[in-house]
Image: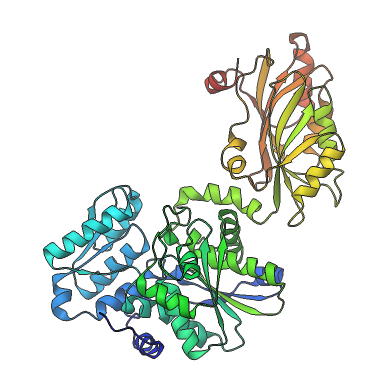
Amino acid sequence: MKKQLKPADYLKKILTARVYDVAIESALEPAKNLSRRLHNKVLLKREDQQPVFSFKLRGAYNKMAQLPPQELKRGVICASAGNHAQGVAMSAHRLGAKAVIVMPVTTPQVKVDAVRALGGEVVLHGDSYSDAHGHALALQAKHGLTFVHPFDDPDVIAGQGTIAMEILRQHQGPLHAVFVAIGGGGLVSGVANYIKAVRPEIRVIGVQTVDSDAMMRSVAARRRVALDDVGLFSDGTAVKLVGEETFRLARSLVDDFITVDTDAVCAAIKDVFVDTRSIVEPAGALAVAAIKQYVAQHKTRGETYAAILCGANMNFDRLRFVAERAEVGEEREALFAVTIPEERGSFKRFCALIGELPGGPRNVTEFNYRISDSRQAHVFVGLTTHGKGESARIAANFSRHGFQALDLTHDELAKEHIRHMVGGHSALAQGERLLRFIFPERPGALMKFLSHLRPGWNITLFHYRNQGADYGRILVGLQVPEADDGRFQAFLDELGYPHVEETGNPAYRLFLRQ
């Protein structure tokens, strides 16, 4: 049985860790905008600026630098589809050792290419991390390689602990808490060991996503708990079972744990971007999301918090999702399903009501409608809000004015899928003309459009989503009698909004036209 290391042992290992052959002492920067909003000072530890855009390089290199020469000569192996793989590959290249990286066959090609570019020998095996891990252990035994664990190893933990050493050296004033993302627990174990040895009054708060909270559940149960499934949005912290050593350390050293949801993480990614003009990966934003939640819960003012931005390996194609959900995560946007009578003028009356909501007019961020019933219409609406908790009051106000409303702001199905599926073929849309408009993104643009419509023209489809530009793209279906073709052209000319008629578009005819 291995001897359990004491806090003093870890302190010595952190102070003597070899990380700076490859890692940099990352900056500790104030998040000025976020600090001003939260009325507390927020410091960002920029581990996203490491050579492999992640803190993982520290622990991997420290582990490998401590190996006896004969072990290093035989080579190392790890199983990873993410940041640990790049850390091991770069460390092996620096030390002149062979590195075998076992990755699932489902790993995105960009990550495979990144590891190969760093000199790693990639072996693709299995559909999951578990498959890759099992194959890595088999190759380790067959070839006499040394396995470099991503988190459950004292030398890896000590390497990650150098982050805390830097934070306390870089910030001399009061520091009330350090917020740390948790996957397997290597980062929080190293950080907590150093802080509790040197500045025990500073709180260490571990952060997990609500769907990948293995450490939090394990600490509550006083034993390691294996999750059946983990959420994959924050893939850097998607760990089903935490390490034995990291569980032992986190259980005794971490002061508290916080879980955050996907929308809060997306909002935090945006917060980091606003202050730094850098984009962190979801795991890298967990600590910032937790600080916001902590401040809201405890009503603190004038305190100082540090958030470790642990990585920035974000797939570019995920940014659309992040931008979409950030506003909801900050509750700067509320979503509703509203039922309005299917009669002329009801759409305009509803839009007018939006402009008269208590607290001032709101911008429409999204509007989805497709005619489907001769008596009533269901529309999907997004509105800007002035603060948290407004969506229920807005829904109640709609209902008081005769528009039955369902608050969808926190409905995952609606946010993820339904908003993109409003529509379809409709027998009531005979003679429909489809037009694509560009509206100026300013108050009154929609009302100008509605006010210029003639009473005999019926809206059968309407789709709009604010994408943050200074103009909005709108798709509108209209039933205009043939006798009104001249008047309709005059309406378009007077409106002055750029437009393209799409009535003959094959995609429209396939999916929307009866």
The quarter of the displayed image where residue 388 is located = bottom right
Mark count = 0
Seen at 49% across and 90% down, the residue is 198
Q: Is residue 121 visible?
A: no
Give coordinates of residue 158: x percent, y percent. Answer: 37, 80
Q: How is the image coloured?
A: rainbow
Please identify the quadrant where the N terminus is shown. bottom left
Q: Is residue 411 visible?
A: yes
Relative horizontal placement of residue 500, taking residue 374 as reference (left or right)? left
Relative horizontal placement of residue 391, taking residue 163 as reference (left or right)? right
Give coordinates of residue 108: x percent, y percent. Answer: 35, 49
Residue placed furthest toward the top: 483
Give coordinates of residue 442: x percent, y percent. Answer: 76, 44
The quarter of the displayed image where residue 111 is located = bottom left
Relative horizontal placement of residue 328, taking residue 10 as reference (left or right)? right
Q: Nearer the viewer, residue 205 or 306?
A: 205
Seen at 40% across and 76% down, the residue is 248
Relative horizontal placement of residue 16, taking residue 168 as reference (left or right)? left
Q: Nearer the viewer, residue 214 or 237?
A: 214
Give coordinates of residue 120: x percent, y percent. Answer: 24, 62
Seen at 34% across and 86% down, the residue is 13
Please identify the quadrant where the C terminus is shown. top right
